[in-house]
Image: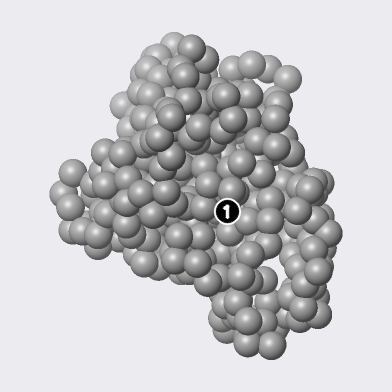
Amino acid sequence: MIVVDLVSAYGLEFKREIPHLSEPLHRWMDFRLRYIDPIPRRIFASNKFPKNLPIAVETGLHHLENFIREGKDVNPYQSKGLVRFNDVSGKKRVKRTDLLWADWGIIHLHITDIPIENGEYFSDRACSNGESWLLFCMFVGNTVGFIDVRQHEDEYIFSDQDLIKIVKENWPDYMERFRLNGILPSREDITNAEISSLRASGICFPTCIDDGVYMGPGMGVTTASTSTQATVKADRVLDWVDSLADFVDDENGQLWIEVKRLGVEKPEFELRITPRGLAIFEPKANIAFTFSKNMDDENSAYFARMVDLICPEWALNVWMADSSSISNRKLKGATPPNF
């Protein structure tokens, strides 16, 4: 129910048209990984900058730069496919995820100098001069690499190999992580149109740059044309839940000791979102045990990372604002134990 609540709170398109692709956790992971966490970041520009841009475009680009440096929400400048249109459970392969992000880990942001209207979440897709421009970038930790700014014209702009070549040219150490050692580059050139078609068909094709062969920094697509990275993360969540169940099942552990102290002999623990974050909840005692955020302890740090993967603070805030999600979830104030 946790990810079902989150999918609902964000109004994510989730048609469940393909049964074996209709697991809510996979839908949530695709959105959660594509969502840009609102934290301050350093910007590193490629050698394609500075660029001679129209004034309206320059203004919009500076606006995005300021938002990124200050840690403000830039997701409204992403494609609307972040919430609508893209759906891992949909019939159309090409619409199951952002294939550029899934393959090369590159995000595109719409550049505009037009303020977002009240009541709207997504920005205008064009500038005040009527032109549509995109910023291609990569978000890695607390940094972002500005790859290039392009007009939204070319049909295959999202499979343009020049984008990943710019990444290799400007940040070779980063790309070295994805080099496929021992593999010789192909002598046959592949077109941008072919890359687009392969992605949509669920075929992950390595990238040849100079004398090297690289897997896409986004980890590529599955045979179902969904994000491989989202699938891997979903599997990690399930593994963590299994290990958490073993921990909770220990009748000599601190959870059982606490609920028995409150008079509950046969507790029924469940993982639940609460106003204080993701927690282990026992309904009979009406008590929640939240997770430690101590990053100095290896075990606690692992738990903290998994909690952030499932329900980061920005998602918790939206969940709390959704009245259907917070009903019947009033919890007793209790000092939680450390995990």
Res 309 visible: yes
The answer to whether 252 appears left or right of 42 in the picture is left
Q: As displayed, is residue 101 above or below residue 111?
A: above
Quadrant in the picture for residue 75: bottom right
The residue lying toward the viewer, choosing from 75 and 268, is: 75
Residue at point 50%, 67% (across, down): 154
Residue at point 76%, 47% (across, down): 46
Coordinates of residue 276 in the picture (x, y in percent):
59, 47
The residue lying toward the viewer, choosing from 339 and 8, is: 8
Residue at point 32%, 57% (across, down): 94
| Amino acid beneath label 1 | Ile
Colouring scheme applied when the structure was drawn:
one colour
The answer to whether 265 appears left or right of 115 in the picture is left
The residue lying toward the viewer, choosing from 314 and 162, is: 162
Coordinates of residue 293 in the picture (x, y in percent):
67, 31
Res 338 visible: no
Image quarter of the C terminus = top right
Coordinates of residue 119 in the picture (x, y in percent):
57, 84
Residue matched to label 1:
107
Within-10-Å neighbours for mark 1: few <14, some 14–19, many 20+? many
Residue at point 70%, 30% (across, down): 172
The answer to whether 60 appears left or right of 186 in the picture is right
Q: Which residue extends farthest front?
A: 187
Quadrant in the picture for residue 12: bottom left
User: Helix, strand or loop at disc 1?
Assistant: strand
Q: As displayed, is residue 128 above or below residue 139?
A: below
